[in-house]
Image (tube, rainbow, N blue to C red):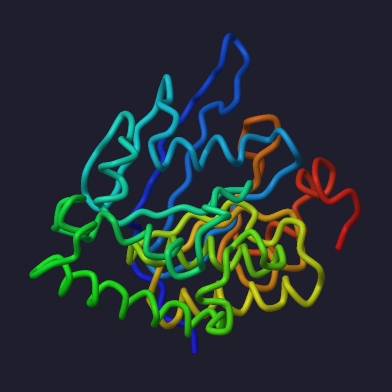
Amino acid sequence: MRREIGEVILALEKISLSFGGVNALTDISFDVREHEVRAIIGPNGAGKSSMLNVINGVYAPQQGEIHFRGQHFHKMNPHKVAMMGVARTFQSLALFKGMSVLDNIMAGRNLKMSSGILAQMIRIGPAEREEIRHREYVEHIIDFLEIQAYRKTPVGLMPYGLQKRVDLGRALAMEPSLLLLDEPMAGMNVEEKQDMCRFVLDVNNEFGTTIVLIEHDMSVVMDISDRVVVLDYGKKIADGSPDEVRNNEDVITAYLGVAH
């Protein structure tokens, strides 16, 4: 049973972003409600990843405002955003390939640790007890993502689909209230996509995490999203329920190609 969708927690108002005179985003506004799965779709180069970069502070827009949980920003700061409960996965995996699954996901707990780096290295007293608590949480994530058999395996030796789960696990280790997923199903086969869809919905339902999702697979978007915003050449051309977007003539022309 899906969690009830709540009030708006994130609002982007008239966001514009350009690089050297090239407009990546132009006057874009949309919002995200608590507990929903909010999809951002559009052709390659539409500005989808740029929008995620604006939300988590990698890019600073030239115009517009961001409202997050009652606070107003002209630009976000990546560290502050993380401290406010926003986590992100990336289109290209940025895992530590020589490290184990457990250690990669533990890396996502750094912001939650109060012990200094030296204390963590020598693992004595409070630092050791703290690490044990964090490892217990990470083990819970490993169980949740069904990768127990790989917990000590170097990530670089794992199949691609499982590496994407580890990437998701590292983001979940931050205990985010808002999770940004940049093409989490990219490069996966059908079975891997089905598994990832299930995990995304379980994160939304069981953890109560609000999700903003970029995805090219329209069957995935239409199946798991509550609302969809469509970008094309850096401009918003549609925003609504999956059915509304699917039947929007501008979307069909710009992205889908045919009526589905």
Figure check: 210 above or below 86: below
Whether residue 157 is situated above or below residue 77 in the rendered picture: below
Question: Quick check: 178 left or right of 151?
Answer: left
Q: Nearer the viewer, residue 82 or 122?
A: 122
In terms of depth relative to the viewer, which is nearer, 122 or 28?
122
What residue sits 76% from the left and 64% below the top? 188
**Left of 243 or right of it: where is 72?**
left
Q: Residue 63, percent across and down?
A: 41, 22
| Residue 84 shown left or right of residue 228 in the figure | left
Q: Residue at x 29, y 48 (%)?
A: 68
Q: Nearer the viewer, residue 139 or 53?
A: 139
- Spot occupied by residue 145 in the image (x, y as percentages of width and height): 53, 79
Which residue is at 27% across, 72% downward?
Answer: 134
Q: Quadrant of the C terminus?
A: bottom right
Q: Residue furthest left?
A: 125
Measuring from the top left, give residue 43's x and y in whole percent: 76, 41
Q: Residue furthest top?
A: 21
Relative to 49, is 258 above or below?
Answer: below
> Is residue 46 or residue 259 the one in the foreground?
46
Residue 79: quarter of image = top left
